[in-house]
Image: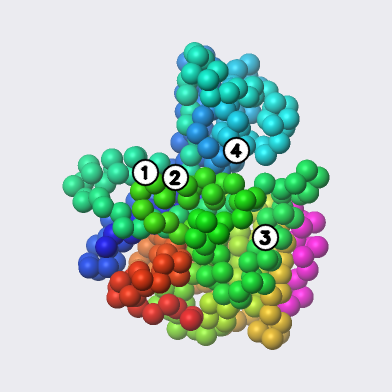
Amino acid sequence: MQILAVDMGTGTQDILLFDPEVPVENNPRMVLPSATRIAAARIQAAARASRPVLFTGVVAGGGPVSWAAADFLASGGRAFATPEAAQTFDDDPDGVRAMGIEIVSADEATRLDADRVVLQDLDLDAIRTALAAFEVPIAFDGIAVGCLDHGAAPPGISDRVFRFEHLQRCVAARNHLLTFATHPDALPPYLTRARAMAACAREAAPVAFMDTGPAAALGALHDERVASYPETVVLNLGNMHLLGFHLRGARIASLFEHHTGELSPDQVVNFTRRMADGSLSNREIFESKGHGALHADRSLVTARLPRLVAATGPRRDLLRGSALRPYFAAPYGDMMIGGCFGLLRAFADVYPDSAPAIEHRLGPLPGA
């Protein structure tokens, strides 16, 4: 059995090809530029060549590609997008047009003389090519994918509010990190980015999806030291988003989500302590430009910070030397692949027949 796990972030895409027949440490893994950074680089190349740009593909992650497109248009560049690709920049077509991007049909796109930038969060052909260059046999029996999807918010509704309401609904349905593990058919229609990523993957193999923040937290529980504590705080400091959990095993006492770049180390310390003691408010997080805070089960909340605060993610150095005294979790010796272990557990949750093979190598589910 081979399961491909792809954790798509803003800065990197973290890839693990899991084979339970060999030690985890021997599984092929790659940390590569994210899909949005690749698309941004292609826009910049078109700008240097004074060429117009045509965006095709599907709705994908924004951030760097949106910033590069804005710079390109501000410098006098001309940009076109097919309707589905245009959703990468704004769910509202009028918002896309307001940026200066012209929306064209698929037929019109074929007649344009422009540099094509394909928007997609998952490029299986590129992954296959990279693995084949190192003589890695490629026969995916399953694919586990993750990204952060704000969701297509209705007009007049904040993307931040809409995203956090989705998290609240998930936790209310099942208080466990694996509540965010989903079969593609069960993804809500408003998670357009997640659905596009899963649709690309399911052309090749059975697919499970999991939100990347909870996947990283679940992955951190695979660190032997983190797993040894019954109660923990796990902070995933991604390049764009910080998601913090107060956990009893894999059950969720509290959580908060914010934008990493909006926070100072002192703010993270303050929010984390108050998440753990139950005093952090949703309003406070939102008004400081974050998404929100949730106390999911106050019976699990204590008046103190747990003995172990684990930090993971590419921006974890923000907390180095802080009053939280964080432990930098590195499951199986590799912090950047941590989310992939969470994705593997998501695959086992969605497809129970695969669980014995996954547990054969990873052991029982941490915090179960």
Q: Amino acid at mark 1?
A: Leu
What is the distance, in whole Å, between disc 4 and disc 1 at their CAs?
19 Å
Residue 72 can be seen in this image = no
What is the distance, in whole Å, between disc 1 and disc 3 at their CAs?
28 Å
Mark closer to the chain start, 4 or 1: 4
Task: Please tell me in which quadrant of the rendered image residue 161 appears.
Answer: bottom right
Q: Secondary structure at mark 4?
A: loop
Which label is found at residue 88?
Answer: 4
Q: Amino acid at mark 3?
A: His
Mark closer to the chain start, 2 or 1: 1
Which label is found at residue 124?
Answer: 1
- Mark in front: 2 vs 1: 2
Q: Secondary structure at mark 2?
A: helix
In the rendered image, the vertical position of residue 202 relative to residue 270, given as above or below? above
List the residue tagged with mark 3.
Answer: 166
Asked if marks 4 and 2 touch (Cβ < 8 Å), the reply is no
List the residue tagged with mark 2.
Answer: 200
In the rendered image, the vertical position of residue 47 relative to residue 279, given as above or below? above
In the rendered image, the vertical position of residue 75 relative to residue 154, given as above or below? above
| In this picture, residue 291 sits left or right of residue 147 | right
Mark closer to the chain start, 2 or 3: 3
- Mark in front: 2 vs 3: 2
Q: Residues within 10 Å of mark 4 (few under 14, many from 20)?
A: many
